[in-house]
Image (cartoon, rainbow, N blue to C red):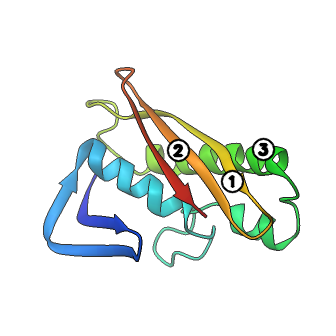
């Protein structure tokens, strides 16, 4: 997998058109973007995204436990999407597991810890606000 480099910051995401990423870096970017995408909203990759926002709008995120459950479903959806769209995932280091756990949930904002485990056992982590 290869793509344009994205820069994530407090003011949002910026596309760095002069730079590219590949391999594990591209997978990680793809996971972050897919978590923030509503399933079915991407016109090219219809299977990209999660139902996490929809569940929130439906009132299904009522506490940190339900947010954790929905986060697990979102992680599974994103891992399936990234794995199925990378023709080289069997020949290089890849994302093997995605862990999402709620840190802050106040009914208006959901902040989750995101941890990725690679096929070599390495772990990468960050905090994301959804």
Label whose residue precedes the other's in the sequence (1 or 3)? 3
Where is residue 53? Give x, y as percent. Answer: 70, 68
- Mark 1 and 2 residues: CB-CB less than 8 Å, in contact? no
Q: Could you say where residue 15 lies in the image, as x and y percent from the top left?
A: 27, 74
Residue at the image point whose x is 68% and y is 47% from the top: 102
Cα–Cα span, label 1 and label 3? 14 Å
Along the viewing direction, whichever of 107 and 20 lies nearer the viewer: 107
Residue found farthest to the left:
18
Residue 104, disc: 1
The reply to whether residue 51 is in sight is: no
| Residue occupying the point 50% across, 50% down | 127
Q: Tell us which disc is closer to us: 1 or 2.
A: 1
Disc nearer the start of the sequence (2/3) = 3
Q: Position of residue 96 (x, y in %)?
A: 46, 31
Residue at x 50% of width, y 38% of height: 115
The residue at which mark 3 appears reads as 69
Query: Label 2 to label 3, Cα distance in Å?
Result: 14 Å
What's the mark number on residue 114? Answer: 2
| Residue sitting at the far top | 121
Label 3 element class: helix
Packing grade of label 1 (10 A; few <14, some 14-19, many >=20) is some
């Amino acid at each position: 997998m290869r793509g344009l480099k994205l820069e994530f910051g407090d003011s949002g995401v910026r596309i760095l058109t002069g730079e590219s990423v590949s391999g594990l870096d591209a997978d990680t970017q793809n996971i972050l973007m897919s978590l923030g995408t509503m399933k079915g909203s991407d016109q090219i990759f219809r299977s990209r995204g999660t139902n996490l926002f929809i569940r929130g709008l439906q009132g299904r995120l009522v506490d940190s436990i339900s947010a954790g459950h929905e986060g697990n479903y979102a992680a599974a959806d994103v891992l399936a999407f990234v794995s199925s769209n990378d023709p080289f995932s069997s020949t290089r280091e890849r994302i093997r597991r995605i862990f999402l756990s709620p840190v802050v949930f106040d009914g208006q904002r959901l902040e989750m810890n995101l941890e990725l485990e690679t096929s070599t056992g390495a772990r990468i982590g960050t905090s994301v606000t959804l």
